[in-house]
Structures are given as C-alpha cells and as structure tokens.
Image: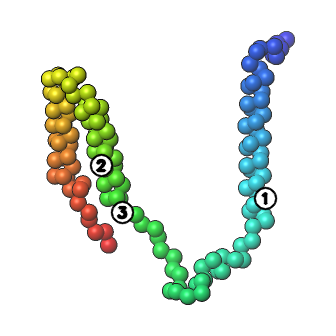
Amino acid sequence: MSHMEFSHPYFGAFFMLFLAFGIFAAITFAANIIGKKLARRDDEKLKLTIYECGFPTTKQPNRISPHFYLFALLFILFDVEIIFMFPWAINFKVLGIFGFVEMALFILLLGIGFVYAWNKGALEWHNIK
C-alpha cells in the first residue's frame, strides 16, 4: 500500500497555489455565467442612437492599415539604434580608434538596412481603398 508524504516542506505552498488557482477559476467562471444571466440586452438600440445632435451612427469596421505597423516597427528599430549610439558618444575618447571603427561598422549596417527598407517601399504610405 502506497501513501503520500505530506511532510514535504513545500507541500503547503503547492497546496495553497492550487487552491488559489481553483478558487480563481471558479470565481471567474461564476462571474461570467452570472453576468450573462443578469445582463440587460434591451439597451443596445439606445447605445447606437444619436446623442442630442449629429449624424446617425453607423457601424464601420475599425480598419488600421498594416503599413502603420510596419512603419511603427521601423521607427522603433531605428530609434533604438540611436539609443545605442549615445553611450559611444559619451565614451568616445576612452574607446579610441577601436570604438570609432566599431561604430562606423554599426552605422554602415544601419544604413544598409535603411536603404533596403527604402527600396522595398516600407517607408511609403499606400492608400488602401
């Protein structure tokens, strides 16, 4: 006959962890079910009506151009590269010629990436209609 050993020093911590997770899951599930049962659904028309004045509301899909994400990604990339240049500029005399050559290679690679993105048309904003 096998038995579990409850005298392990971490047994209480693991038990409390699983108990807390179970209670969290039960409360989340119960809140979801109760919220669906008690929610009033007859006020949806009121939310879509005109408030005092203005054009009638229409449902439109919220379309964000994928070019925005590409442009933002390139901005973050080149912005972070500038942050890497700041410590080099502060310690320029300490780094000497080795630091200068390393930063020149870094700027060269950054320039190659910029020219590549430019040639691929990543920096041009296209109209999508």
Q: Up-down: is 88 above or below 74?
A: above
Mark 1 lies on residue:
34
Q: Residue 59 appears at what percent x and percent y?
A: 51, 76
Q: Is residue 76 above or below residue 55?
A: above
Quadrant of the image occupied by residue 89 = top left
Which one is nearer the viewer's eye here, 77 or 103?
A: 103
Please state which amino acid type lies under the numbered disc 1. Answer: Ile
Element at label 3: loop
**Eye-nearest disc, 3 or 2:** 2
The numbered mark, 3 or 2, whose residue comes first in the sequence reads 3
Mark 1 and mark 2: Cα distance apart in space: 45 Å
Q: Quadrant of residue 106?
A: top left
**Quarter holding residue 20:** top right
Position in image of residue 47 (x %, y %)? 63, 77
Mark 1–mark 2 CB contact (< 8 Å): no
Q: Is residue 41 left or right of residue 6?
A: left
Residue drawn at 28 percent across, 41 percent down: 82
- Describe residue 60's horizontal placement relative to residue 104 as left or right: right
Give the residue drawn at x 73%, y 49%: 28
**Marker disc for residue 74:** 2
- Mark 3 or mark 1, earlier in chain: 1
The answer to whether 7 is drawn above or below residue 102 in the figure is above
Badge 1 local density, few (<14 within 10 Å), some, or many (20+)?
few
Nearer to me, 33 or 127: 127
The residue at the point 20 percent across, 46 percent down is 114
Which residue is the site of mark 3?
A: 65
